[in-house]
Amino acid sequence: MALHFRQLEGLFFTRQDGSSLIRILVEYATLRQKIENPSGQSYYFKRGLESRQKRLVDLTKEFTYVKETFNMSTIDTLLEKINENLEGKRHYEKYGMNTIQQMHYSKIISENEFLRELIRLKSKTKSLQDIDFYLENPEEFLVIFE
């Protein structure tokens, strides 16, 4: 019987998405390092350098949005928003959904995950800094990562 990679995938990779903030930071750091050292990259990476730089800007904007949301919110406001979303979710579960409502239902679920992540971060730090701060101070990155 042949052994396929799909059978071993669970041993090597976890299926959870993890923190969106950490994903942004890791992708930003990796991409920035590659852009700063283009000589060590492949021909295709060099050809797509402009799009990679745009991706770097997009990641910065995404992180800035998360940072502003985090710094301007309190735990109480985050919990209130989660409760509002749960009411909408219960309504959809009780009365059923069409396609557009299913899309909204999925958005509610992902937004609640994001809000719970912000609440978890609030217990670790009072405010978030700019994205480059975490690259220059890896010990602060570890506070978020844990």
Image (cartoon, rainbow, N blue to C red):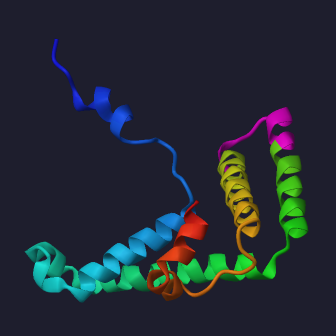
Per the rendered image, the range of residues in magenta is: 90-100
Q: Which residue sits furthest front?
A: 139
Above or below, comparing residue 59 to residue 13 in the picture:
below
- Is residue 98 in the magenta section? yes
Residue 80 % position (x, y): 90, 61
Which residue is painted at 29% across and 81% down in the image? 33
Quadrant where the C terminus lies? Answer: bottom right
Q: Which residue sits furthest top?
A: 1
Foreground residue among 100 and 115: 115
| Quadrant in the picture for residue 135 | bottom left
Residue 119 % position (x, y): 76, 63
Above or below, comparing residue 115 to residue 57 in the picture:
above
Residue 16 % position (x, y): 51, 45
Foreground residue among 47 and 140: 140
Which residue is painted at 81% across and 76% down in the image? 73
In the image, 96: left or right of 113? right
Above or below, comparing residue 117 to residue 140 in the picture:
above
Query: What secondary structure do most residues of the magenta stretch adopt?
Result: helix
